[in-house]
């Protein structure tokens, strides 16, 4: 046997040993994860089904709506928790996420992108209106690195509470989001026939607003999560109703001196396109976002 053959055999043996060691370590983590998950399940006395890839799921309610396919658009909810119950991350009930079912495994958390296939797979087992619980072992979740910014430790198993909303249309979700917002903030608003909701904080007694009026307005615009996307309160913003989003047409019901708060559904705001910064391309208003405005009608010229 020449020295090159001996060297090749040694390198091959070394590679086999290293691979076996790595596989053994990986398998041991899977075994530890599975034992921890089974202990959690037994303690909760809840029946879970184990998928061949290693995650566990429990269908809580199947849902009474239609079954959904990967190509169907869905609105859904999620809560990420540790097995000890610590909340890590969750969807908002005033800016409800929506996408095609086939894309529901994609998440951006604190600037990092993740693909959690079990989430899409479990959601696909539900009808509209259904709910489920998913337990992802660490290798299918955040892995050995964890995610310190949301307190996920190394090799941590993750519990995910999932649901598909029964609503399938954007305007239905808009209504739900605005209702949720008003309830959570203990607000009572009047609903106009246009579906814009409003709260009058000061009734004006000046000139009536017409479709052709030139208006001086003070305003602050927010998303329902409180993010301010635009504001002008210096008494210098001049416009006609033709020059603003259609949700502001409701100002025709009021007079100069009026102060009010408007809640505008997305289709009467910036719709499916949303709004981006023209110079940077950064998203200012997400697609299908409801809007929350404080508006003062400073003056009206007819």
Image (cartoon, rainbow, N blue to C red):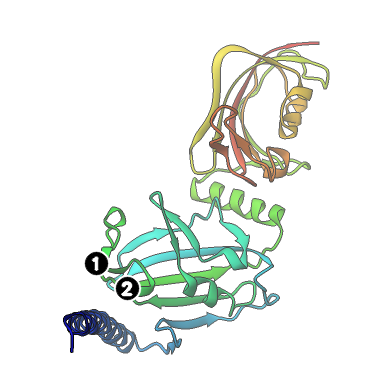
Residue found at x 65% / y 51%: 174
Q: Which residue is mark 1?
A: 154
Q: Residues within 10 Å of mark 2 (few under 14, many from 20)?
A: many
Q: Which mark is residue 72?
A: none
The residue tagged with tag 2: helix, strand or loop?
helix
In the rendered structure, which disc, 1 or 2, sits on the residue that comes first in sequence?
A: 2
Query: Residue 292 placed where, x, y %?
Result: 58, 37
Residue 234 in the figure: left or right of residue 139:
right
Residue 138, quarter of the rendered image = bottom left
Q: Which residue is mark 2?
A: 138
Residue 292, above or below 168: above
The image quadrant of residue 134 is bottom left
Please state the horizontal and vertical placement of residue 7, each as a whole percent of the image.
18, 80
Instruction: Kindly indicate whether the residue at mark 2 contacts the one at mark 1 (C-beta within 8 angstroms).
Output: yes
Q: State the residue in front, 90 or 286.
A: 286
Whole-Å distance between the Cαs marked 1 and 2? 8 Å
Q: Quadrant of the N terminus?
A: bottom left
Q: Is residue 68 left or right of residue 110?
A: right
């Amino acid at each position: 046997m020449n020295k090159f053959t001996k060297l090749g055999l040694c390198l091959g043996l070394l590679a086999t040993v290293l691979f076996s060691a790595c596989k053994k370590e990986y398998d041991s983590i899977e075994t530890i994860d599975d034992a921890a998950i089974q202990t959690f399940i037994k303690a909760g006395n809840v029946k879970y089904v184990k998928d061949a890839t290693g995650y566990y799921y429990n269908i809580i309610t199947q849902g009474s709506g239609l079954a959904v396919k990967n190509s169907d658009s869905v609105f859904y909810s999620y809560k990420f928790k540790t097995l000890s119950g610590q909340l890590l991350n969750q969807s908002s009930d005033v800016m409800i996420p929506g996408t095609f079912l086939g894309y529901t495994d994609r998440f951006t958390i604190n600037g990092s992108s993740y693909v959690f296939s079990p989430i899409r797979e479990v959601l696909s087992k539900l009808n509209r209106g259904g709910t489920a619980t998913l337990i992802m072992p660490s290798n299918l979740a955040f892995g050995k690195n964890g995610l310190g910014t949301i307190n996920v430790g190394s090799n941590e198993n993750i519990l995910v509470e999932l649901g598909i909303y029964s609503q399938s249309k954007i305007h239905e979700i808009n209504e739900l989001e605005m209702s949720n917002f008003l309830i959570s903030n203990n607000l009572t608003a009047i609903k106009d026939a246009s579906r814009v909701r409003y709260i009058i904080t000061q009734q004006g007694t000046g000139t009536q607003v017409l479709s052709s009026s030139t208006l001086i307005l003070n305003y602050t615009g927010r998303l329902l999560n409180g993010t301010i996307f635009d504001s002008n309160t210096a008494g210098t913003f001049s416009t006609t109703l033709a020059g603003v989003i259609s949700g502001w047409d409701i100002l025709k019901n009021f007079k100069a001196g009026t102060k009010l708060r408007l809640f505008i559904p997305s289709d009467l705001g910036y719709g499916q396109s949303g709004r981006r910064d023209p110079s940077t391309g950064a998203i200012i208003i997400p697609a299908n976002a409801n809007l929350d405005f404080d508006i003062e009608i400073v003056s009206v010229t007819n």
